[in-house]
Image: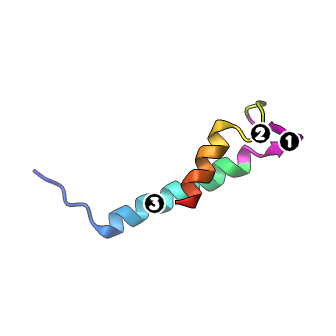
Amino acid sequence: MVETITEADIGSEVEALHQLATVVLNEHANDLGLCAVCGCAFPCERAVLADHNLTL
């Protein structure tokens, strides 16, 4: 059986990714040059990826 994917399905998936990216960016914030969560140099990989996803 082939499942049909609708424009609404895609829209809801994009919205879910947008919300997740927002949460990640809020958590992985700049704390004096370090990521507040990871402790590595800011921006960390997760913050960069989240920023990229928000741009889309």
Residue at the spot x=42%, y=63% of the render?
12
Reply yes or no: does residue 18 show up in magenta.
Answer: no
Task: Check if mark 3's residue and mark 1's residue have beta carbons within 8 Å.
Answer: no
- Whole-angstrom CA distance, mark 3 to mark 1, is 29 Å
Residue type of the residue flagged with mark 1: Asp
Stretch in magenta:
27-37
Task: Work out how far the residue at label 1 is from the one at label 2, CA to CA, in angstroms.
Answer: 8 Å
Q: Amino acid at mark 2?
A: Phe
Mark 1 touches mark 2? (CB < 8 Å)? yes
User: Is 24 situated left or right of 36 in this image?
Assistant: left
Quarter-of-image position of residue 9 = bottom left
Helix, strand or loop at mark 1: strand
Q: Earlier in the sequence, mark 3 or mark 2?
A: 3
Residue that protrudes farthest toward the left in the picture: 1
Q: Is residue 36 above or below residue 9?
A: above
Disc 3 marks which residue?
14
Instruction: Determine which residue is flagged by label 1.
Output: 31
CA neighbours of label 3 inside 10 A, class few (<14), some (14 to 19), many (20+): some
Residue 36 inside the magenta-drawn segment: yes
Query: Compared with residue 7, is residue 40 higher up or lower down, i.e. above or below?
Result: above
Farthest right residue in view = 32
Frontmost of labels 3 and 2 is: 2
Measuring from the top left, give residue 17's x and y in whole percent.
50, 54
Find residue 42 and name its label. Answer: 2
Label 2 residue SS? loop
